[in-house]
Image: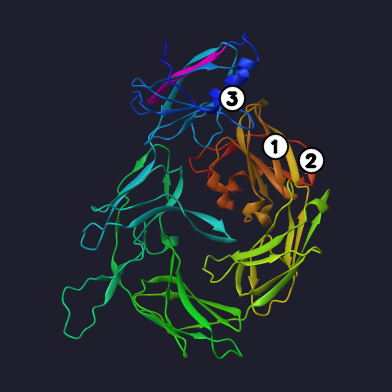
Amino acid sequence: MSFPFFRVWVSLSVCGFAAAQARGPALSFGTIAGMVVDAGNNSPIRRAVVTLSTIEPHPQDAVAWTDGNGRFAFGYLPPGHYELRVNKGGFQTVQYGTDSPRRPPGTISLAAGEIRSDLVFRLQQVTTIVGTVTDEQGDPLARVSVSAMHWGWQRQKRQLLPGPGAMTDANGHYRLNGMPPASYVVVASRPLGPPLPVRSEIAAGETQRAYAYGTQYYPGTDRADSATLLSVEAGHEYPNIDFHLAARPCPSVQGKIILPPGITMLEQASIGVFRDGPNRANFGAGVSQPDFLFRFDQLEPGSYTFIAQGTAGGKRYRGTQSIEITSEGAPEISVALKAPVDLTGTVTVAGPDAAKYPPTTVSLVTGDGTPMNGPQLRATVNKDGSFVIRDVPPGVWDINPGPVPPGGYIKSMRLGDQDVLTEEMVIDSSTQAPLKIDFGTKAAQVQGDVTRNGQPVRSTVVLAPEQRYRHVMSFYRTVAADATGHFEIKNAVPGRYQLFAFDEFEPQSIQNPEFLKPFEQAGVAVTLREGDNTPQTLSVIATASPTLGITGGVQ
């Protein structure tokens, strides 16, 4: 069977062919060709995008489109190793050598003058969740945000993490497309907007009470931990995931900013509120002086954090208060401003060529997601490694020291006796302990091979920290084992780990450390030290479930 050639050469035509011509006229070019069809009915797919990539440190790509018969071809190819993938709107991406997007792709080894024209790609339609959102009377609700979220861990806390989302149309319909196989919590929530006056009649002099549609988790609960997990598999449509939102009263909340001891007046004062949940939002209100009262009208029921900020004598003060607001409202709120502190510390660099990589800055960003007024908290590191970050308000802070030496790592960060590399750093007005940061110039490296029944196999290799650090995402490393089963992991933090090799792997899985529990016995324990470590041999783990981490075994 012959195939017409459809070629749109990018860098491959310029670099690859120029190199081929430089090697002389004896080189014979090859061909890679095939068809793309719908896996459901075996019909050809037109205008699918087929990408051919070389396998090298800086890959070069060529792109072709399928014709009306679903055919494609790449010609004048020099011998070498290639990867091939196919994309088409409404279908899942397919890669040569695998039937799952969660498996590593295969390699096409093309000899001089070889013609490969037998390739057939079968595309499955994307996974979708569809449904309708209505009000109590069954009328459709437009512009409602529907999201598919998944349970994971952030900052040592189990919480819902963002996933695919969509807005309802004028008929209340929504469609979530391209869902990776996993278990989801589907939630509907109307973004903050003007409250709804829902009463058709009102007595003279009576104030019209405002209402809003609250957040609802499928199949009809306002609590995330009561939601039903919807397990989705590749290529399926999940219909009738419907919501019926009820309008709830929006109460007014008032409160007062409490000044810190010794402060009687603020040069500037502000109050903001941060709403937690699927549609996070923050907004502010005016603060009256000299009593520093505030009021928020028509807040939708939910969980909120109130953030008070002010300046006095050139110093920034800050305070927070978390409140649950119901349809009946909340008691009067008091938000106490707390004094800032000067955070002192040192940064050291140890290891080969340490003197070449002096640290330059240390900065802080809020670690709880709440907004922060004013310039970034940042300090320049002195030649002796010392630094001072002035006027750090109380709160949870993430630390960004830098730059990390090339090929190096952060060995430790400690606030006094507390390990703040693996735990949250909480600053309050009484904090006096110094922050000590240590860099190493030589991170850990480990390589090895993955086999199945003694034969090399492609896979995804996961380096997972020991149990007590499973929540520390920065300790994880994931790499692909190539066609020879070989893998290399670089720039790891020295310590105790387990190595796993999966035939299927969903990248978001590491956001939930519990996903590894069914596979603990299949992991290989390693203790990594700075520099090169002993090579490891792994057996590939076959994950039998569409949602990684539920069932599995070793082959």
Query: Which of the two residues, 296 or 424, is positioned nearer the viewer here?
Result: 296
The quarter of the picture where residue 454 lies is: top right
Label at residue 198: none
Does the segment drawn in magenta span residue 5? no
The amino acid type, in three-letter code, at marker 1 is Glu
Q: Earlier in the sequence, mark 2 or mark 3?
A: 3
| Secondary element type, mark 1 | strand
The amino acid type, in three-letter code, at marker 2 is Asp
Residue that appears at 28% across and 74% down: 210
Q: Can residue 475 be seen in this view?
A: yes
In percent of width and height, residue 377 lies at 63, 68
195 horizontally vs 322: left or right: left
Q: Distance between the residues labelled 2 and 1?
A: 11 Å
The quarter of the picture where residue 457 lies is: top right
Tag 2 residue: 532
Residue that appears at 64% across and 76% down: 428
Q: How far apart are marks 1 and 3 (CA)?
A: 27 Å
Q: Which residue lies furthest to the top in this view?
A: 26
Dominant SS in magenta: strand
Query: Which of the two residues, 436 or 464, is positioned nearer the viewer here?
Result: 436
Tag 3 residue: 15
Task: Report the quarter where the C terminus lies.
Answer: top right
The amino acid type, in three-letter code, at marker 3 is Cys
Q: Which residues are the magenta region?
A: 29-37
Q: Which of marks 2 and 1 is nearer the N terminus?
A: 1
Q: Earlier in the sequence, mark 1 or mark 3?
A: 3
Query: Which of the two residues, 457 or 424, is positioned nearer the viewer here?
Result: 424
Tag 1 residue: 488
**Quick check: 243 above or below 2?**
below
